[in-house]
Image (cartoon, coloured by chain):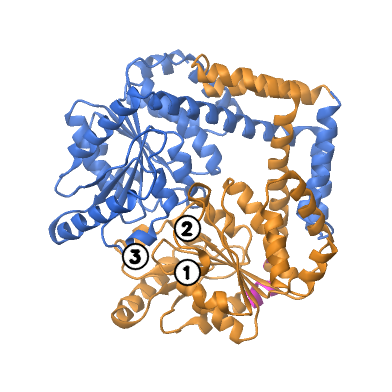
Chain colours: A orange, B blue
Amino acid sequence: MNEYLDGISRGNRVVLAKALTLIESTLEVDRTEATKLLGKLKPVIKDTIRIGITGVPGVGKSSFIESFGNMLTKQNKKVAVLTVDPTSQLSKGSILGDKTRMENLSKNPAAFIRPSPSGGALGGTTLRTRESILLCEAAGFDVILVETVGVGQSEIAVKGMVDFFLLLILAGAGDALQGIKRGIMEMADGLVITKADGDNKKKSAEARAEYQQALQLFRTDESGWSPPVLTCSALEHIGMEEIWKMILSYKEKTSKNNFWKLNRQRQSVNWFHEYVEQGMMTEIQQSPRIGKLIQKLELEVIQNNQLPVLAAEKLLAAFRRKLSST
Amino acid sequence: MNEYLDGISRGNRVVLAKALTLIESTLEVDRTEATKLLGKLKPVIKDTIRIGITGVPGVGKSSFIESFGNMLTKQNKKVAVLTVDPTSQLSKGSILGDKTRMENLSKNPAAFIRPSPSGGALGGTTLRTRESILLCEAAGFDVILVETVGVGQSEIAVKGMVDFFLLLILAGAGDALQGIKRGIMEMADGLVITKADGDNKKKSAEARAEYQQALQLFRTDESGWSPPVLTCSALEHIGMEEIWKMILSYKEKTSKNNFWKLNRQRQSVNWFHEYVEQGMMTEIQQSPRIGKLIQKLELEVIQNNQLPVLAAEKLLAAFRRKLSST
């Protein structure tokens, strides 16, 4: 335990990687150790920035993170890259490993890339990623990039653990405006049109104007911040500084109106709730009497003698009696 | 209640729509009614086919469903279209309503389109969609199309409630093969290249060959079925019959080796589990003593006096004591 704590506080990457593996483990003994480790982490003094990055497949997330991450390390920032990928529970990882995807950044001594853990449901992955963020911060990383894949529930999970949520967009990819779900657009604190280079430059500038106009239809949310639309080229390393400036300006503005802190507080409470929900469910399944009833009802459902929803209501009635009897 | 039952068994669309609204309601009184209604539904005698349809934004899901649905109704099938969209909890629905998206099909008397319910988490939406499928089947629909948006957790939810999972793909959309997550590819029982018309025809044929080759890398799963790759054009109404034939042939093959039935049984058990989990959590939050402890710990988390994961472990310890005391 002390080895972990020492190594992490000294920013030792091998120890950090080992600690992350401990956190991702689903073994009960490892979970106990992981919780202990988290409880002993020294509070992080310096300000960190947690940035969520999303966009449909093909938008160039990996290239963006490479270019953006390298720019940050040149400014003496230490950068950690984490990934939330609910599909990896099926495929046990992406076709291309994260380190191959970001070859340059993975060799950068000021950067740390952690491939998405495979296995487990989204809920579990989300909890583990939150803990991983804390570990990386304790190990001295200034900027945490949390990448998410595609469009869907993983965005909502990542939005719930970052300070700034960045949506990457491809100019003129078919029905651009219709294609991106309004729900995802509304979550974004900033939009960036990627691959704004070569023949794509003009189209990107047009798309930028279009999106900027579309965003005006949305109300400013509680943060008091209106999401800007920028363009960039990871290939030519253009636009990365502007994106970083946008994020810093978000931090400045929302720190003044207290939203930055409020957002982190809310995220902590949600984290607490999610952890409790998952833990309680595990407990209940291990309780002998209810465990037996579950088995009986399952059999009825399998034999088609009972509609799942009605079987569930029966079990809930038993659970209600148990709770009220104490 | 009898009005509901009568109307549904006679296939009355107005009553069906009302019953679906009852099912989607989160009010407790409506939930009780909805459960009662589900319990009284007459068992569906005739075989139905539940088809999940996914693909990234811009792939042409709506046009595909229009063309495919109209083809089915010409074969005297009654078709219901449902949507699972976790992002609608934020945006309260898509930019374009489902009925505008599928104008032709929505006017077809043998088809029924139900826009995605807005509000609520993915878990709740999933449970409601499962119940909606049952209602539509009781109302005499033969084919249920369940559309999902984008790439992510909603696919996993829809895969868990259908017999056949169809992945729509656009030929040559950037880094085609890298773009589609292997996890989603592995879930598919069939792939269809959309918009295979005009200038796109040759590219689509090439993509078809490419994907067919890529799919050979995957093992055949328990179903004993190898996912075919087809092409279609919703614009020219080409390829729809072949897709239907593929699905029927899947049904024939997996009915023989019993996988069809096994899959539905497993889905029922999962449905039961999901329903129980959500219901138990609601109960616990309403229990007075634990409810109070939750409030106290929440405050500590907000004031940054306690790490969320450690506060959660404290609550779980109290819950454990309560469960073991009975």
Q: Name the residue under label 3.
A: B175
* Highlighted range, magenta: A251-259
Q: Is residue B314 or residue A260 the one in the foreground?
A: B314
- Give the chain of mark 3: B
**Residue A2 left/right relative to A240:** right
Q: In which quarter of the image is residue B301?
A: bottom right
Do discs 3 and 2 belong to a common subunit?
no
Question: Earlier along the polypeptide chain: callout 2 or callout 1?
Answer: 2
Position in image of residue B149 (x %, y %): 40, 49
| Relative vertical location of residue A281 with respect to residue A30 in this rendering, above or below | above
Query: What amino acid type is highlighted by mark number 3?
Result: Asp
Q: Mark 1 points at which residue?
A: A101
Is the residue B6 above or below the residue B56 in the image?
A: above
Q: Which label is found at residue A94?
A: 2
For marks 1 and 3, give the CA distance. 13 Å
Q: Magenta stretch containing residue A254, yes or no?
A: yes
Q: Do the residues labelled 2 and 1 touch (CB within 8 Å)?
A: yes
Tag 1, which secondary structure?
helix
